[in-house]
Image (cartoon, helix red, strand yellow):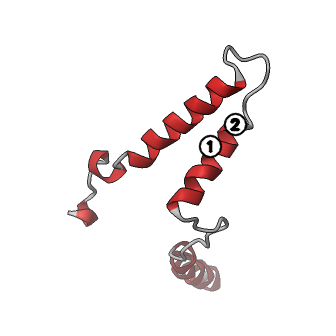
Amino acid sequence: MRSLLIVVVALSLGAGATFAQIPTRTTPILPPLRLHDSAVVDCMQMWDSGTHMTKQEWSRTCKRVQTRLDSLDVEAIMPKTKTQR
C-alpha cells in the first residue's frame, strides 16, 4: 500500500511539469499582408455557384470582411485577467 502511495505521489508531481510545456506552433507566422491574402484566398474557396452572390461580389465581401478583421483591436475588447493587470 505504501509503495502505491509513493508511485501516485511521484506521478502527480511529474504531471504538473507536463502540462506546463508550451505547445509548438504548427503554422508559420506570416507577415500581415500575406496573412490577409491567405485569409481572402481561404474565403474565396468557400464560394460555389449555389450562393446568392456572384464570384465577384463574394470576392469583394471576402476582402471587406478580412480588412475589418485585420483592423479589429482584440486586445481592447477582451476582458483582462488578473495576470494581465
Q: Nearer the viewer, residue 58 or 19?
A: 58
Q: Residue at x 73, y 29 (%)?
A: 47
Quadrant, the N terminus: bottom right
* Residue drawn at x 47%, y 42% as measured from the top left: 67
Q: Which mark is residue 40?
A: 1
Image marks 2 and 1: residues in contact by CB distance under 8 Å: yes
Instruction: Give the x, y percent position of residue 68.
Output: 43, 39
Identified at 37% across, 45% down, the residue is 72
How dense is the environment of label 1, judged by Cα within 10 Å: few (below 14), some, or many (20 and up)? many
**CA–CA distance in space, label 2 to label 1:** 6 Å
Residue 10, placed above or below residue 31: below
State the image quarter where residue 30 is shown.
bottom right
| Residue placed furthest toward the top | 52
Residue 49 % position (x, y): 79, 20
Q: What SS does tag 2 mark?
A: helix
The outermost residue toward the left is 85
Q: Residue furthest front?
A: 56
Q: Nearer the viewer, residue 80 or 59?
A: 59
Task: Give amino acid for label 2.
Answer: Met
Residue name at image x 63 percent, y 68 percent = 28
Q: What kind of residue is marked 1?
A: Val
Quarter where residue 35 is shown = bottom right
Q: Quadrant of the C terminus?
A: bottom left
Q: Which residue was labeled with disc 2? A: 44
The spot of residue 58 in percent (x, y) is: 64, 27
